[in-house]
Amino acid sequence: MYAIGGISGAPANANAPVTNEAEVYSPAANVWVKLTTMTNALADLAAVGAPCHQGVVNGCVYAIGGSADGTTSLDTVETYSPATNAWVSLPGLPTARRALMGTAANCPKTSKDRCLYSIGGLGVPPPGNTAIAPATETILGTTEALPIGRPQHPEGSGRPESSGGRPNSPGSPDGMGSPDGMGSPDSPTNAGRPAADG
């Protein structure tokens, strides 16, 4: 389980800063561990666990959109790889948005590639929408897809695409499995079951 960005300080503090910190919880050790900080300080973002973008193996965590000041939407996308303990910036969203929902699924035109989806939220509609005043944020009813490519696996692994991990797999903090939590040692579906090869 990951905690990414947000407001640092008491909720009643109107001047509390937005943070770029990220932490991961290890059920095995029952502790939170600090990770490398994000490139951007973000609140109101969407966080998604999904296969890594091209060139990186195993599962990654994506930080999508959000706001650096609590009022202005951003189009930023960053991805964290547990294997490298590093954040990498990806191409921005077509529409800057905050307080959005995010998920990962097959891309609209092909089932072989994966996409991140930014859903709804607050933002400025694309130019040409005359119903909204320029530069005025409103509730968005749109969904946009950002391709992240085909999942990469360790060379020679021969493993099929899977959004889940397995205990003590590379890039899994403290053997927790993939960032989306599927296939972790604590999952009921894996209880008492040894990891299968291939």
Image: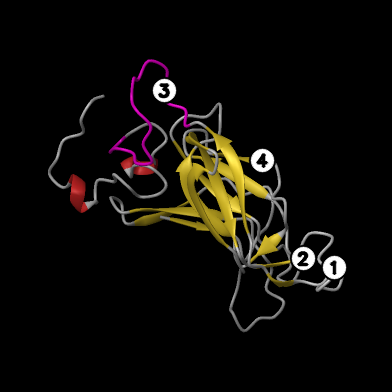
| Residue at (21, 33) in percent of width and height | 195
Q: Amino acid at mark 1?
A: Ala
Q: CA distance from mark 3 to mark 1?
A: 45 Å
Give the x, y percent position of residue 129.
Answer: 81, 66
Q: Earlier in the sequence, mark 1 or mark 4?
A: 4
Q: Amino acid at mark 2?
A: Val
Residue 195 numbered mark, or none: none
Q: Amino acid at mark 4?
A: Leu
Nearer the viewer's eye, disc 1 or disc 4? 1
For disc 4, the marked residue is 90
Q: Secondary structure at mark 3?
A: loop
Tell me if label 2 and label 1 are in contact, CB under 8 Å: yes
> Is 161 inside the magenta-drawn segment?
yes
What scheme was used to colour the molecule? secondary structure
Q: Earlier in the sequence, mark 3 or mark 2?
A: 2
> Is 182 inside the magenta-drawn segment?
no
For disc 2, the marked residue is 124
Give the x, y percent position of residue 20.
Answer: 63, 56
For disc 3, the marked residue is 154
Residue 135 numbered mark, or none: 1
Give the x, y percent position of residue 3.
Answer: 49, 59
Tell me if label 3 and label 1 are in contact, CB under 8 Å: no
